[in-house]
Image: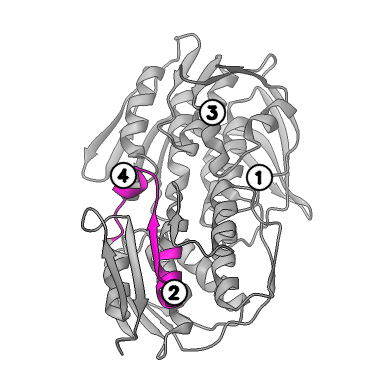
Amino acid sequence: MIKTVTLSHPTGVLSGTINLPASKSEANRALIIAALAGGNSTIENLSEANDTQLLNRLLQRNDQTIDAEDAGTVMRFLTAYYAVTNQQKVLTGTDRMCQRPIKVLVDALRDLGATIDYLQEEGYPPLQIKGFAYSGKNHLKVRGDISSQYISALLMIAPLLPDGLELELEGKIGSRPYIEMTLALMQHFGATATFEDTTIVVPNQNYKPATFLVEPDWSAASYWYSLVALAKEAEITLPGLRKESHQGDRAIVEIMYRLGVYTEFTPEGIRLTKKHCEKKVAFDFTNCPDLAQTIVALCAALGVTLEMTGVESLRIKETDRIQALQIEVLGMETSLNEMSPGVFRMEPAIITKRELTFRTYKDHRMAMAFAPVALLEPVQIQDPDVVRKSYPRFWEDLEKVGFEVVNNE
């Protein structure tokens, strides 16, 4: 029997202060760079997300076979880390992880001197990493529209390469803020780099151990924006978030201003309140693809016409997120259609079905994106434990603001 959680809210009025989990994007980069710096660094406010806790454990173990489970950053960052540190490892993951491509990163690492074999299907995990002998090549060309995790993985190991690395990004650059986040964290640990036009240059140099404070997660904040937008009345405080943030998902501030949420930055963090909501919006998610599910679910619930682009990378995430969204919004009596290549449109609908049920496809963001709909009608979320990947306390935090959360076995 599939485990579900039933959500409802008796009043639709939200008020409270929520301490968000720390950013796993920042935390996972900091962990890799700290390891490359040789230890003696301190990472404060380390994310409780399963991905981050997993990476932290794996970096401290000497196992021959490494299981990255369903964590994309863990798989990609460790592939580069083990290669440049000349470690012999077998790197594997869940069935879904072994369906997610890694050829672009492996090809780049091979060009630099890594010996990496595919143990099953060409271009996909599991991988056998056999060692590293520098090829003498320090200039790579990589497509800019691939997962930024590949690019970040290469950048973080670049200072350790004998001649550094010149990385040329070809075509449209996706998720640029994540690349800039990586460079900012590298600088925090003493490594300089330049990013001009489409070329990133990282000289050979040594990282320096440092103390780093991980910011709360703007991706997690996005679900609270959605909750405020759907509430009858709301005032939610989220401590620790900064106006000047390295996280690309800070874009939620501007996006949600159009969808009915006002953000007030305070010395302590942010305060969210309700405002007027537009009825027709268009967003480009190129630099913040992890926000797309939140916005699709919210617009379906609000009856807002949505047009979106920049979501190509969603096809190769924990699930095919485009397909999953197209299926799940049907239960809200609306449809998400691809009008032309890469351009999606969703027309408004009126929710009349009682007690909606949403599947999660082993994807944490599907669970949290659709949970706020419970402010309109009771909602069942299948496989609710998937939130452990990035926000383990999500259901408990909903209870703090008055949600009734019933676990069903």
The answer to whether the residue labelled 4 contacts the one labelled 1, judged by CB atoms less than 8 Å apart, is: no
The residue to which callout 3 is attached is: 384
Q: Residues in magenta? A: 78-102
Residue type, mark 2 in image: Leu
Amino acid type at circle 3 is Pro
The alpha-carbon separation of the residues under discs 4 and 2 comes to 24 Å
Residue picked out by circle 1? 263
Q: Classify 5 as above or below 344.
A: above
Residue 214 drawn at (x, y percent): 66, 60
Q: Looking at numbered disc 4 in the image, what kind of residue is underneath it?
A: Arg
Which mark sits nearer the N-terminus, 4 or 3? 4
| Residue bearing mark 2 | 155
Q: Are marks 4 and 2 in contact (CB under 8 Å)?
A: no
Q: Is residue 108 left or right of residue 51?
A: left
Label 3 environment density (alpha carbons within 10 Å; few <14, some 14–19, many ≥20):
many
Q: What is the CA distance from the residue labelled 4 to the residue labelled 1?
A: 31 Å
